Image (cartoon, rainbow, N blue to C red):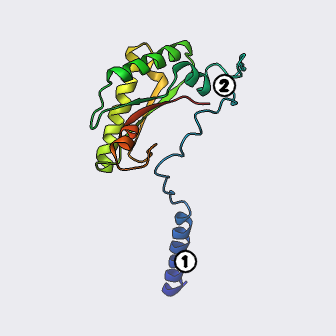
């Protein structure tokens, strides 16, 4: 082989390797997972072996949680992550339900209003979710059944730039799977 043929072969091998590796490049993950389905899906199946009871709601399901507890959401004051008296009442009811359903695992989402930077709101949302989790743990729920996730200001429930919308968006949501 001549030097020119060897150089050409080396170039072809290098280009082929680069093409092969380009196909293996990691794809950029989505920034946020898709939102959960509607909170009122009462027809979904619950844990294996369970079935609907008299009212058609599966014990241990999201619909059962909402019916028994009343709400999956607690609200916070501006720039705060402390659990106020109203939130304590709601979280106490959630803890009672979770203790009664020891196989159910939940995710607690932290949310903020639109004000502030993305980074600040992600951190504040994390503090809110963690505060709700810590309250549930102190009320007897096993910490390994609770995970937290912060969305910051990325998933508002109320659109608008006024106190009413902001107050609705400053929250922690306990998400019970179907």
Identity of the residue drawn at 51% across and 17% down:
98
Q: Is residue 129 above or below residue 137?
A: below
Label 1: how many Cα within 10 Å (few below 14, some 14–19, many 20+): few
Q: Nearer the viewer, residue 178 or 115?
A: 115
Asked which quadrant contains residue 177, the reply is: top right
Position in image of residue 124 (x %, y %): 31, 38
Position in image of residue 49 (x %, y %): 72, 19
Mark 1 or mark 2, whichever is nearer to me: 2
Assign a secondary structure to mark 1: helix
Label 2: how many Cα within 10 Å (few below 14, some 14–19, many 20+): many
Q: Which residue is mark 1?
A: 12
Q: Nearer the viewer, residue 68 or 174?
A: 68
Q: Which residue is mark 2?
A: 46
Please state the total of marks drawn on the protein image.
Answer: 2
Q: Quadrant of the C terminus?
A: top right
Identity of the residue drawn at 40% across and 14% down:
139
Mark nearer the N terminus (1 vs 2): 1
Q: Nearer the viewer, residue 134 or 61?
A: 61
Position in image of residue 113 (x %, y %): 35, 44
Asked which quadrant contains residue 50, the reply is: top right
Identity of the residue drawn at 55% across and 12% down:
100
């Amino acid at each position: 082989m001549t030097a020119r043929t060897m150089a050409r072969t080396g170039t072809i091998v290098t280009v082929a390797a680069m093409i092969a590796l380009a196909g293996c490049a990691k794809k950029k993950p989505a920034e946020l997972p898709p939102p959960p389905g509607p909170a009122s899906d009462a027809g979904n199946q619950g844990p294996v072996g369970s079935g609907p009871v008299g009212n058609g709601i599966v014990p241990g399901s999201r619909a059962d949680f909402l019916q028994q507890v009343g709400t999956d959401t607690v609200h916070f004051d501006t720039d705060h992550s402390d659990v106020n008296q109203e939130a304590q009442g709601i979280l106490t009811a959630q803890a009672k339900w979770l203790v009664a359903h020891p196989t159910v695992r939940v995710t607690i989402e932290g949310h903020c209003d639109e004000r502030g930077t993305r980074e600040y709101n992600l951190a504040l949302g994390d503090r809110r979710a963690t505060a709700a989790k810590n309250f549930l743990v102190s009320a007897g729920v096993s910490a390994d059944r609770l995970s937290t996730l912060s969305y910051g200001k990325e998933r508002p429930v109320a659109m608008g730039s006024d106190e009413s919308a902001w107050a609705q968006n400053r929250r922690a949501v306990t998400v019970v799977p179907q």
